Amino acid sequence: MYAKSERSKIYHLLYSTFDYTLCGQKAKGVDLKGSTQGPGLRVVSEQPPNRMLCKQCEKMEQRKGINVMTKAVGTLSILLIGTVVLGM
C-alpha cells in the first residue's frame, strides 16, 4: 500500500497497519467516495504513477531488507551449528 498527497509529486510506503508511512508520517484512509482531496496523506492501493518515492521511505525499506536478511542468516547459522553438533 502507498500514501500520496495531492500537493506533492512524492509517494510514500506504508507499514502493514496502513496508518503510518515508513518515514513516520500519519496517513489517512480513503473516504467512501474514493476521493483523495484535502490536506494530508491518503492511502492508495496502487503505486501512484508519475511520482517519486520518498527518499526516507526508500532508506527505511532498504534497512528492512537488510534486517530481514540478517535474521535469516542468523537462523541459518544456528541450524548449521545444530546439524554439526547433533551429527545430522
Image (spheres, rainbow, N blue to C red):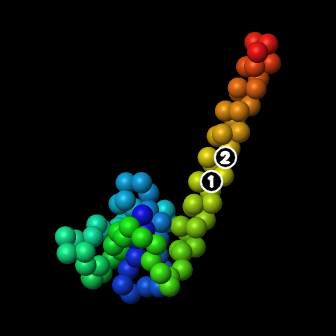
Q: Say what amino acid the circle numbered 2 marks.
A: Met
Q: Say what amino acid the circle numbered 1 marks.
A: Gly
Q: Where residue 10 sits in the image (x, y, percent)?
A: 48, 80
Is residue 25 shown to the viewer in this render? no
Q: Label 1 neighbourhood size at 10 Å, few (<14), some (14-19), many (20+)?
A: few
Find residue 65 and name its label: 1
> Residue 56 occupies which quadrant of the picture?
bottom right
Q: Where residue 39 sits in the image (x, y, percent)?
A: 30, 81
Find residue 43 and name its label: none
Is residue 14 shown to the viewer in this render? yes
Find residue 69 and name its label: 2
Tell whether 57 sits left or right of 82. Answer: left
Tell whether 50 sits left or right of 4. Answer: right
Q: Which residue is drawn at 58% across and 67% down?
A: 58
Q: How many labels does the image show?
A: 2
Answer whether labels 2 and 1 touch (C-beta < 8 Å): yes
Frontmost residue, 38 versus 85: 85
Residue at mark 2 to residue at mark 1: CA–CA distance: 6 Å
Asked if 21 appears above or below 7 in the picture, the reply is above
Tell whether 31 sits left or right of 17. Answer: left
